[in-house]
Image (cartoon, rainbow, N blue to C red):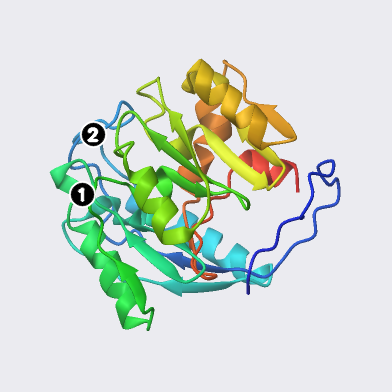
Amino acid sequence: MTETYPATRAAAPQGRLPQPRAYLMCPPDHFTVQYSINPWMASGEPVDTARAMLQWQLLRDTYRSLGHSVELIDARPGLPDMVFAANGATVIGGTVLGARFRHPERAAEGPAYLDWFRRRGFTSVHEPRLVNEGEGDIVHAGRVILAGHGFRSDHRVRHDLERLFGLPVVSLRLMDPRFYHLDTALCVLDADTAAYYPAAFDDAGRAALAACFTELVEATDEEPRRELEQSRRVDATRVDGLEVYLMGEAGQTRG
C-alpha cells in the first residue's frame, strides 16, 4: 500500500480517488493535561477521558470502515501526549527517522515509537541527531519534504532529511506560537493542493508554499485553529512505507 502522486502538475483533481492506507494510532488510555508546553494547554484542566476514548474509537472505526487498516501502539503511563502519534517519527519509503522532542516532558515518546518500528521489522531505523518532532513538523508532500521550524524542530534537520530520504527539503519558518507545529498550520491534500493558514508563516515560507503547490486553500483569520488544528484531534501516523499522514477538516471537505 503505497501513496502515489501525479507525475505532472495538473490542475487539482475534483474527484480525488481514495486509496487504502494503513495507520498507526495510540489510544488515549493515559491522556490528560499534566503540563503546559503550548498556548492551548492549561495544566490541571480536567479531561473527559471517556469522551476522548469514544472520539478515538470513532476515528479508528471510520478508517477501517473506509477500507484502511489500523495498527496500534500501546500507550505508556506518564506520556499523555503519546496519543498524538504523528509526532512519533518520520517515515518515508520504509526508512524511519526517530523523533527527538524539545520538551523533556515528551522525551520518552521518541524511543517508545522507535521500539515499535524495530519490533515490527523495520530495518532502516535511525536515531535522531537533532531535535525534530516527527510529522508534527515534517510533511512528505510527494515530490518534496516540507520541514517546519521556529518553535520545536531544529532547522538543521533538513540535512538529515535530504540524506536519509533522498528528496529535496523546503524549510518553512513558523512565526506564531499558537501554530508551533507545521501540522497545525498546513494540511497537504495531494501533491498539488494544500490548505494552510498564511499568517503562521513568514514571507519566505508563503512564497515557498506557493512554488510547491498549484492550489493553496487559505484558512481564515477567524478560526484557523478550528480549520487546521483538527489534524491534532484526528492525529494518526500512516504506516504505508510509514509515511506519516495527517487528515484535517480541510482535507475532508475537499475529498
Q: In the picture shown, does residue 53 fall above or below 255?
A: below
For the residues labelled 2 and 1, say whether their Cβ atoms are less than 8 Å apart. yes
Residue at point 26%, 56% (across, down): 128
* Quadrant of the image occupied by residue 53: bottom left
- Looking at the picture, which amino acid does disc 1 mark? Arg
- Tell me the residue that label 1 is attached to: 106
Residue at point 36%, 79% (across, down): 123
Residue at point 84%, 41% (across, down): 11
Q: Position of residue 177 (x, y in %)?
A: 35, 23
Q: In the picture shown, does residue 95 fall above or below 88?
A: below
Q: Is residue 160 left or right of residue 8?
A: left
Q: Position of residue 45 (x, y in %)?
A: 24, 35
Q: Is residue 181 left or right of residue 238?
A: left
- Label 2: element kind: loop
Q: Is residue 52 visible?
A: no
**Residue 27: mark:** none
Q: In the picture shown, does residue 23 fall above or below 119?
A: above
- Looking at the picture, which amino acid does disc 2 mark? Ile
* Quadrant of the image occupied by residue 79: bottom left
- Label 1: element kind: helix
Q: Earlier in the sequence, mark 2 or mark 1?
A: 2
